[in-house]
């Protein structure tokens, strides 16, 4: 009975793949990190608090990274780890030194990203593109 209820719950949750494409990648060797957030906590710089995390090559990131998240409101942060330390390197005052991007930002950010302003409804078969900006 317990397994049957779990199966029914699984069927009732709509999970569709959506794809994240990273554009404007200049460095062809450094790894790309992507984090998807469904809440403000951790956004944008603590990727470990994201509900989806991905690390891979620039070529893979340009082709698109598929997620298996349900329809929802998400904020997405991306950075390229130029110095290879597995985290976004920042200046003393918190401005990123490495290339980074946030969902919905079509111009280089002038202030710290905010979850409410930078989250977007993502649904079945969506493709979101994120531009990498250099410091």
Image (cartoon, rainbow, N blue to C red):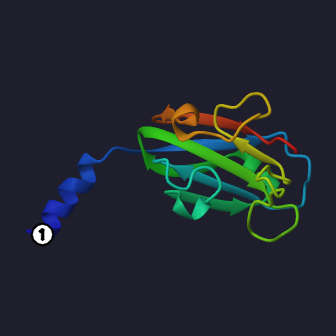
Task: Spot the residue most to the front.
Answer: 93
Could you say which is closer to the camera, residue 12 or residue 122?
Answer: 122
Q: How many other residues sit within 10 Å of disc 1, few (<14), some (14-19) or many (≥20)?
A: few
Say which residue appears at 66% left-offset and 54% top-offset. Answer: 34
Say which residue appears at 79% left-offset and 42% top-offset. Answer: 132
Quadrant of res 118? top right
- Compared across the picture, whether 90 is left or right of 118 comes to right
Residue 60 can be seen in this image? no
Could you say which is closer to the camera, residue 69 or residue 46?
Answer: 46
Say which residue appears at 73% left-offset and 46% top-offset. Answer: 63
Relative vertical location of residue 95 with respect to residue 123 in this rendering, above or below: below
Q: Position of residue 80 (x, y in %)?
A: 80, 55
Relative vertical location of residue 45 with respect to residue 120 in this rendering, above or below: below
Which quadrant would the C terminus be assigned to in this image? top right
- Compared across the picture, whether 13 is left or right of 116 comes to left
- Compared across the picture, whether 120 is left or right of 85 comes to left
Q: Secondary structure at mark 1?
A: helix
Q: Position of residue 74 (x, y in %)?
A: 50, 41
Q: Position of residue 16 (x, y in %)?
A: 44, 44
Q: Position of residue 78 (x, y in %)?
A: 70, 50
Task: Spot the residue most to the top.
Answer: 106
State the residue position of label 1: 2
Could you say which is closer to the camera, residue 27 or residue 59?
Answer: 27
Which quadrant would the N terminus be assigned to in this image? bottom left
Total labels drawn: 1
Residue 31 can be seen in this image? yes
């Amino acid at each position: 009975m317990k397994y049957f209820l779990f199966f029914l719950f699984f069927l009732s949750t709509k999970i569709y793949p959506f794809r994240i494409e990273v554009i404007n990648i200049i460095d062809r060797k450094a790894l790309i990190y992507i984090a998807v957030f469904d809440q403000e906590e951790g956004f944008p710089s603590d990727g470990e608090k994201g509900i989806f995390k991905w690390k891979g090559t620039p070529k893979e990131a340009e082709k698109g990274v598929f997620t298996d998240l349900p329809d929802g409101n998400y904020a997405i942060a991306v950075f390229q780890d130029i110095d290879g330390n597995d985290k976004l390197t920042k200046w003393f005052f918190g401005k990123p030194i490495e290339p980074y991007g946030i969902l919905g930002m079509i111009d280089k950010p002038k202030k710290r990203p905010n979850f409410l302003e930078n989250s977007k409804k993502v649904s079945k078969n969506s493709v979101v593109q994120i531009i990498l900006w250099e410091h």
